[in-house]
Structure formats: C-alpha cells, structure tokens
Image (tube, rainbow, N blue to C red):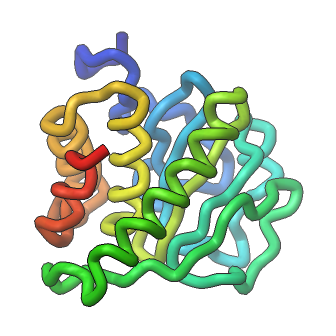
C-alpha cells in the first residue's frame, strides 16, 4: 500500500528518484509491479537512459512519432505510433482508427510488463496520449476507471498541468478497456 492508501498506484511522494530526472515533472512512476511502469514527456538529449535501465525499465513506447528521432539505448523502442494530439479537447478525427492504435500499443506494452520488463510511455507533453495509454493499461490490469481517472488527474496537477484528461474521449477510452 502506498502513502495515498491505494493498492500500488504511486504518488509523487512514493516515486523512487532517478538521477537526472525531476519527479514528477520530467518523469513519473505509475507502478512498480508487475514491473516498473512510467510516463514522461518527449525525451530530451540529456535523458538518463542508463539510469532508467538501472531502475528496471527496458522498453519505450513512443506515441507521437514513428520512428522516434532518438535512441534510448540501453532501453529499446518497443512500439512507436503517431497518435492524434487532443490537447484542445476535441475527440479524434478518426476515433475508430485511434482506438485501434491505442489498443495495439496497450497490448504490446502489457505483454512485456506482465513478463516483468519495465515500460516507459511518452508523447510530447507526457499527459494526454500518455495518460490514455497508461490508463488503459491500468484498466486492463484490473483498476477501476474512476480510480484511474482520479489518479491521473491528481498526478498531472502535481506536475503543474491542468489535470487529466485533455479530452473527454480519453477518459472514455480508458473506460472501454
């Protein structure tokens, strides 16, 4: 149980430090089990990939470009896809396509997470698309939709953002898992 009284979702106070990354702004842990799961904004050239590997992360899921324009070695790019940015609150232009892309990203990421391999998920800002995929993964792991949405909202407010979701469709997507 973590300091916020839930069953594994990490609050900023619970997040293990990683040298070179400011928690939760530049990187935020979500779970430690079944393997490390985290979100972040688009990686900077100074992202400490080796420190992330030492913390148990093995894979990166990129949600804003395919292929990514960086090398996360010693981590590897598990999955890369260009999801639509919903920062202005509108639903996606092609919701069925977007849902299929999200479901695929979640399936791939869950496969390695459940095998004990850590996953970092990112988009550009680390909130909307990242939160949607992380939320859908949490839903697939058995967390309730309302708990996930509340958790992501509080987490992103702690990051200095306006909360989560960016678009109602993103919260609905989490509920569809």
The extreme top residue here reads 1
Residue 17 falls left or right of residue 9: right
The extreme right residue here reads 74
Looking at the rendering, in which quadrant would you find the C terminus?
top left
Q: In terms of depth relative to the viewer, which is nearer, 50 or 86?
A: 86
Q: Position of residue 97 (x, y in %)?
A: 39, 77
Q: Residue at x 36, y 10 (%)?
A: 1
Q: Is residue 83 above or below residue 7?
A: below
Residue 173 falls left or right of residue 33: left
Residue 99 falls left or right of residue 166: right
Q: In terms of depth relative to the viewer, which is nearer, 60 or 51?
A: 60
Q: Is residue 91 above or below residue 23?
A: below
Q: Position of residue 71 (x, y in %)?
A: 81, 73
Q: Quadrant of residue 169?
A: bottom left
Q: Residue at x 66, y 55 (%)?
A: 20
Q: Is residue 152 above or below residue 138?
A: below
Residue 96 falls left or right of residue 106: left
Q: Residue at x 42, y 62 (%)?
A: 130
Q: In terms of depth relative to the viewer, which is nearer, 11 or 61?
A: 61
Q: Position of residue 124 (x, y in %)?
A: 46, 78
Q: Residue at x 27, y 18 (%)?
A: 6
Q: Is residue 60 above or below residue 107?
A: below
């Amino acid at each position: 149980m973590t300091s916020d009284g839930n069953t594994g979702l990490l609050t900023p106070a619970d997040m293990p430090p990683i040298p070179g990354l400011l928690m939760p702004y530049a990187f935020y842990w979500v779970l430690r089990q079944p393997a490390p799961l985290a979100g972040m904004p688009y990686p900077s050239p100074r992202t400490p990939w080796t420190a992330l590997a030492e913390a148990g992360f093995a894979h990166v899921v990129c949600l804003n470009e395919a292929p990514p324009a960086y090398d996360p070695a010693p981590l590897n790019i598990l999955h890369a896809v260009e999801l639509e940015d919903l920062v202005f609150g509108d639903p996606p232009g092609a919701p069925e396509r977007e849902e299929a892309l999200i479901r695929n990203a979640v399936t791939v990421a869950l496969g390695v997470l459940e095998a004990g391999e850590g996953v970092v998920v990112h988009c550009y800002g680390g909130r909307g698309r990242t939160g949607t995929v992380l939320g859908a993964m949490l839903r697939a792991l058995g967390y309730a939709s309302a708990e996930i949405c509340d958790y992501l909202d509080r987490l992103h407010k702690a990051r200095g953002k306006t909360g989560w979701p960016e678009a109602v469709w993103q919260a609905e997507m989490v509920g569809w898992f």
